[in-house]
Structure formats: structure tokens, C-alpha cells
Image (tube, helix red, strand yellow):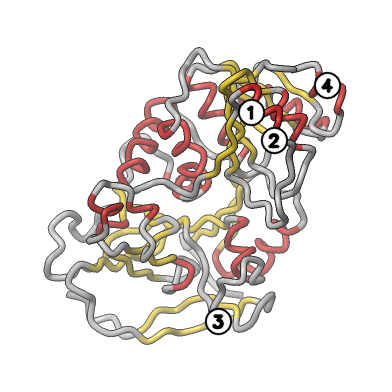
Amino acid sequence: MSNTTGINAYAVLQAGGPFQPYRVRVGALGATEVELDVLYCGICHSDLSMIENEWGLSQYPMIAGHEVIGRVAATGRQVKRFAPGAIVGLGWNSGYCEICHLCRMGDRNLCREARFTVLTNGGFADKVRADVNSLVAIPDGVDLVSAGPLLCGGITIFNPLLQFDIKPTDRVAVIGIGGLGHLAVMFLNAWGCEVTAFTSSVYKRRDALALGAHNTLNSLDPAEIEAADSHFDFILSTVNVNLDWDLYIQALKPKGRLHFVGVVVDPIQCTLLPMILGQRTMSASPVGSPATMETMLDFCARHRIRPRVEVYPMHQIEAAFQHLKSGKANYRVVLSREGDTPD
């Protein structure tokens, strides 16, 4: 059992506000809870969306951070799975109802009562608490410094590869080479697919090839996209802006799928007839279940996949977020508590 009476964190007190040191009083651990000493915590664009209440879901004060790599410090009385000292990861969800049909079928990530880590005191702190069933063991061979982004960005990309049975012989395109897209290119290359990267940046076209893409196309050049007519089995959109989706739908083979993992807030517009004639599909998905996260981590260990990260000490969280907002991050940002000493 834990005797911890407080968590030292960085919180925002209102939408879009600056980060401030913040202390949270906590009681005894719940029977199925685990307390982690935070080692590293990735910064995700979803953290920014929640901090600024872009999705209308936010509550303040907010301690965000949901890409947590931590060391088990204490466990509740019913926890048998992890012992103190174990290195584990915590992603978007910090707990589930465990009784609904989706939970019982293993689809915990779709549980309507799932608790968002960012709304239950997240990883921008020295400690974090979560239900044991939301945690995953970090296997040998996974780099701890860069592992945090796998627990949100990585699983968001990996989940649809399993859900839609993407095959090594498939031709797959990725729209946007950023925090999500660079992981998608690495995953799909290791999966065995022919990978095409859609990006408007000359630098990122070169980078995508270095990351494992076989081809690149300009995402803002209709002629280049039209030249790929009926070429792809699967197109994965990682961007958060609207594009001419009809062009991408036409680039799908019959029975192909355009799948969204980037959150586009505005309504999506497309012409239905090309979808009907080609029996094409549009879909979207969130993060994956803890079991799928474990499979992804094993996949990353086997193929030596590491997100490309830039590391800031935890106390420089404001500077880290400004770097993220600038659009210049290459490609994910991670906060470290290792040797972290406030100014």
C-alpha cells in the first residue's frame, strides 16, 4: 500500500492557460490501482487539444500527459500482475468499467465508461495512478526514452493494421508525415507493405523515404494524386485538416478503405458515388486495447522501431509545448524526469 499524500505536477488552470506547478492530494490506493513514479511522458497533439478544449471535453485544473513510462512504486491490495520496480506504460485510458460487453470481449478501448488519463491526473507529474488493467509491461528491446509516444501515437497507427487485416502484399498510403505519420511509415514498412507517403513538404518527402516509404506523392497536387487512380488497398490519414477527400477515395482500389486516425474537427465532405461504384469504405478508429498495445510493443521490439523524439526536462514543459505548437517538432516531444531539476 502507498502512503503518498500528494502528487507534484504541472497543470493548466483554464483553457489555453500556461502550465503551473500544482499539487494534488491523494488518498490510499484503490484495490486495483497502481501508483507509478513517472520516468518519461510524451507530449501528444491530443494533449494540446485537451488543454485548449478544442474538443469540448476538458475539465480544469487539468494535469495532462497520457504517454507515460513509469516505475511501479506501489500497488493496491488486489493487484497481482505488477510488483514494485516493474517498468510499465500508461496510455490514453487509465481505467475501464470491466463489466460491459466491449470490455468482456477485449475491446476495452471502446468502453463508454473508459477514463481518460488526462481527466484523472495525467503524466505531467512526478507520480500517476491508474487501474492495473490499463497498464502494459514494457518489454526488453524497447527504448524507454522514446517508448511513451508508442502508447498513443503508436497504438493509434497499429490498431487499424490488425482491425482491418492489412496484408504484407497491400499497397498502403499515409497522408501526413508528422507525429503519427512517421510512425505509420515505419510500421507499414516492417509489416511488409508497399508504402507511399503523401506530404506537401519537400523535406518530409526525403525524410519519409529514409523512414521506409517506397514512394512519395504531393498531398496538395491534384495531378499527382489523380495519377494514382485505383492504386491503393488502404489509405491512412493522420492529418487534422480537411483535404479534397474525393481525390483520395478515387486513389483507392475497389474495396479499398480510407481510414482516419487524425482528428479533423470540421465535417468531412466527399462524393458518395465513387464509394458506391467501387465498394470503397471510409472509417476511423481511436487507440487500441491494452492487449493490442502489448502486441504492438512486441512488434516494435522485434523490428527495432523507435519513434523519433526530442527530449525536454519536465520543468521545461512550457517550452516543450511551444515547440510542439510551432509545428517544428521532429517528430514527437518527450518530457523526462531523469535528473530533472527546476530552474
Query: In the image, what residue occupies the spot 69% across and 49% down?
Result: 240
Q: Secondary structure at mark 1?
A: helix
Camera-side residue of 295 and 53? 53
Q: Are marks 2 and 1 in contact (CB under 8 Å)?
A: yes
Residue position for label 4: 224
Mark nearer the N terminus (3 vs 1): 3
Alpha carbons under labels 4 and 3: distance apart: 45 Å
Q: Which mark is residue 272?
A: 2
Alpha carbons under labels 1 and 4: distance apart: 24 Å
Mark 1, residues whose alpha carbon is within 10 Å: few (<14), some, or many (≥20)?
Answer: few
Residue position for label 3: 60
Query: In the image, what residue occupies the spot 81% across and 21% down?
Result: 226
Q: Which mark is residue 155?
A: none
Numbered disc in front, either 4 or 2:
2
Residue 51 x, y percent position in the rendering: 62, 70
Residue position for label 1: 276
Camera-side residue of 173 and 16? 173
